Amino acid sequence: MKKVLKHIRDYFRELDKALLALCIIMSVFSALLLYSMNINDISAQVTSRQWKINAIAAAIGIMAAMVLSAIDYKLISKIWFIYTPIALILVLLLFTSLGRGVEGADDIGWLNLGFIQFQPSELLKIAFIMTFATHLSKVGTKLNEPLNMLLLILHGGIPIFIIIKQGDDGSALVFISIFVIMLFAAGISWKYMVGALVAVPVLGWFVWNHMMQPYQIKRIQILWDTEMQEEEILGIYMQQYLGKKALGSGGMTGLGLFGSDKYTYVPELDTDFIFSYIGMTMGFVGCIVTVLLLAALCLKCLSVASSSKDTLGRLICIGAFAVFFSHSFINVGMDLGVMPVIGIPLPFISAGGTSVISLYCAAGLVMSVHSHRKKAEHMFYSEKYD
């Protein structure tokens, strides 16, 4: 019993309480925003069931993060062959009759198993962070050898290709961000970077002219089109137009979370455009506080990465940072009108049960690196994993 109590004390002593607190604060903030939407009944977008599901997902996510933080990340890395095939199979099932889309979305991103419906691509992000960090740490200083680089590109290209074929442009962009940022952090040679800079414009031209659908091209073109016709404003640009209008309507301190008669209706206000709702109800001050919370989350991941005792732990933290940063940048960019609307939630704040649990798992991996940065005896730790 004394040994168990000692392990528990050691666990809470090493637990990254600051990171966990940041995530919980944003989840509480999310619950307040979603409850506010439900009470205000803005076009009945958010029901009481939705914000309750989000709160339950946050509770499950917190437990998952705490469990992951107790397990040595090196052990999680070693059992990649268990969770990675499961994540891949679940994503591939989207191409069967089990795949579902949601109203207003262009992709088939939801898996309906009858008793539950969720987004398997969110789980694949976590598996990809672990497997890619493992791969990068194993090649080590031989990263820039041509064969190793080719295998790493294949490693990153397979999930990106699957997600693109699924039609989820937003998640594909997040996977690309994880791939690029982790490669950069691992020490990719400047020669490959120069080659990429030369290849990107050519690849971009090909994708633009031969792979993108007209509606996808239009979503990008409207970002710099200053002379849109009225039918375009009322059509493909309407959501972003209303989002920017809502964002600016709150002024410095906002219209208030409850009871205003001046709220602006925006489609997907609880997910893609929740930052617009923050601006509308809490104003510029609320937006700045939100950005500061997200920045603190990203910086905490980088801080843990810098204190990691090995390359694997550092790269896991960089992968989690890439997820949080890309989600935040794309979501806020959509609401500000500087990024196309591609359906990416704001970390821990937007509605979405699978996304919330997945993000807590990413935080849990960072917490595991923090907890096991020193050689010590932990509840789920053994020196044989070193």
Image (spheres, rainbow, N blue to C red):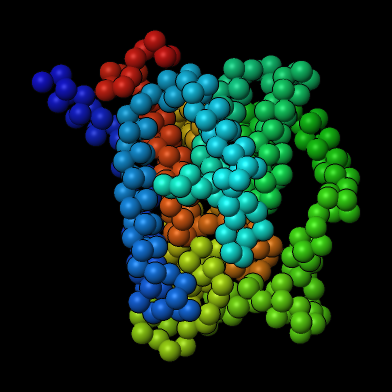
Viewer-closest of 168 and 144: 168
Camera-nearest residue between 324 and 188: 324
| Farthest-out residue, top | 384
- The quarter of the picture where the N terminus appears is top left
* Residue that sits furthest to the bottom in the current view: 261
Using the image, determine if residue 90 lies above or below residue 57: above
Question: Residue 128: horizontal and vertical position, in percent?
Answer: 57, 33
Would residue 323 appear left or right of 50 to someone viewing this image? right
Name which residue lies at 51% across and 57% down: 346
Give the position of the C terminus as an image quadrant.
Answer: top left
Residue 129 visible to the viewer: no
| 51, 365: nearer the viewer | 51
Q: Position of residue 48 (x, y in %)?
A: 35, 68
The residue at 64%/72% (across/down) is 240
Q: Is residue 56 above or below residue 194?
A: below
Q: Is residue 108 visible?
A: yes
Q: Residue at x 36, y 51 (%)?
A: 58
Q: Is residue 146 above or below residue 48?
A: above
